[in-house]
Amino acid sequence: MNIPITTPPKISIRGLTKQFDGAPTHALDNVDLSIGANEFVTFVGASGCGKSTLLRTIGGLEVQTAGELLVDNRPVTGPGIDRAMVFQHYSLYPWMTVCQNIKFCRQLAAHTQDRSSSDVEAAEGRADALLRLMGLEASAGAWPNQLSGGMQQRVAIARALMGRPDIVLMDEPFGALDAQTREVMHDLIRYVHRLEKATIVFVTHDVEEALYLGSRVVLMAPRPGRIDTIYEVPFGDQRTQDLKFAPEFVRLKRDILERIRETSGMKTDLEQLQRLRG
Amino acid sequence: MSQLPPFAPSLAGSTAALPKAPASAAPAVPVPATVPATAPTPKPRRNGFWTVRTGISRRAYWGLALTGLITPLLMWAALAAWGGMEPTFMPSPTAVLAKTWDWALENNLLEDMGISVYRVVAGFVLSAVIALPLGLLIGSFRSVQALLEPLTDLIRYMPAVAFIPLVMLWVGIDEGSKIAIIFIGTFFQMVLMVAEDVRRVPAAQVEAAQTMGANRRELVEKVILPSAKPALLDTLRITMGWAWTYLVVAELVAANSGLGYAILRAQRFLQTDTIFAGIIVIGLIGLVTDQLFRWAHRRAFPWLNLKG
């Protein structure tokens, strides 16, 4: 997606550096990136490249050691209701039903400061709409423990969307799902993105997933964690599962995988293995 | 936005337009899955006694549980009858039963039970009322943890029995001192266990609430506490057992009633049947309490142990 130059970026990152206590290298080293409103950016990279740390910093769950992080031109000082986060697992509240989980943010002061009756009504409508959107109507009264992993993640996504966040941060949300469920979730999340007009920042270790979902794929490299390459994804907005077999898609996927191997030092390991064998 | 159209995954036909495989590669031909007719069908193995971590039938469970309970009882009866031991030192089960009956009818067993239960419950409740909020704070805030946990750890290792002389000097020899000893015996363990339960709340549950805008108070009240509740009830159940072990110690302190006191007095008069009766009554009370806690656990947390 092309962002007109005149629009100010939704998220603006300049010189962002993060070092954890006692860690030898920077988890994030001088990261620069702008993310436009309504963009769908995916992050890939070898483990330890800092993609999750970057996401958590945008979410306000980590604090940077140095550098600037602006959302809507305001510095991030902590978590906020404009940035909802979806985790890989264990984030649902098992003592609440599916419907109660989705409506959780309505229990929080940050979401209910104006308690007009129309607001409450709108929230009820919103919860119903999200249940339907996610195909969860039949499970509204179920406990999360009774649902499959895929259904649980639908609940987690619906719960994040409930508060109408501008930005949805997703940390390997489909990482624990099986391949078939994941395909369904991919189309679902693209549909949600078109419908909700939210900016989505999506971290994954699955290159195919990153390419299929993102308008840009940001490849990060480890030790120290940094942005290596940014790939503009040329497939437009209308994507179907067939795309995954298109030559252009396969070529890009191979390029990205190759680059991840190079940046992670895996390639030299493979060469060494071959030398040992030969 | 409240009228969102339902989402329909468009997977139909997604495999219809696959690009042709290169001619050089051998085409993958689907092979129908058939079972060779001669294949022997081994009998499915049933769950036996030594099958690791698999369920057993309800009947088998109760059968084994009863065997486990009755066998020591029979061994005790055999030892008393033919073990060649003096009945004064080893009374038979029937003698103990008769003694218990006698105690209940003539010597106010119920009163002894009542006063002992009262002491245990009072010490336990007092301990829980302070340990729960304190443990919640230690588990939720690193600063409170740094402030209080090392101290608690230190006191935990001091034997509660050693505090008896101090307690007698400070509290005196009335009910307060017995409750105080049960309190000292359970409180410090309880604080640390509660803190550990609270720390075990999954980070993702807390962080999800943070990104939904929960403030500090809401995090503790609406996420951490409800999430830790099942573990907390288990902690209470376990510490209740410890409260009973400290009862006998507490009733050493110039008591003139209670089950622990009755056991100690029986020793002085060589009434081993009373000692046996007292110990068994305490055991039974503990068993009943434990079952009550388990029942409450099942009732309070129906969302646990569900199978989809």
Image (cartoon, rainbow, N blue to C red):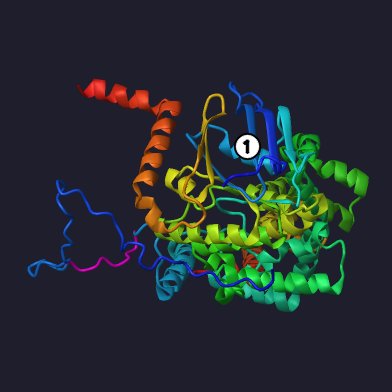
- Is A74 one of the magenta-colored residues? no
Q: Residues within 10 Å of mark 1 (few under 14, many from 20)?
A: many
- Using the image, name the chain to which the residue with label 1 belongs: A
Quick check: B173 left or right of B103? right
Q: Is residue A34 above or below residue A133?
A: above
Which image quadrant for residue B4? bottom right
User: Residue B65: x, y in percent?
Assistant: 47, 68
Q: Which residues are magenta?
A: B42-50
Q: Is residue B260 visible?
A: yes
Residue kind at label 1, given as amino acid type: Leu
Query: In the depicted view, which residue is nearer to us: B184 or A134?
Result: A134
The secondary structure that most of the magenta stretch takes on is loop
User: Residue B11: x, y in percent?
Assistant: 41, 65
Residue drawn at x 88%, y 55% as measured from the top left: B176
Residue drawn at x 66%, y 65% as measured from the top left: A102
Which image quadrant for residue A126? bottom right
Farthest left residue?
A: B38
Which image quadrant for residue A160? bottom right
Q: Which residue is mark 1?
A: A54
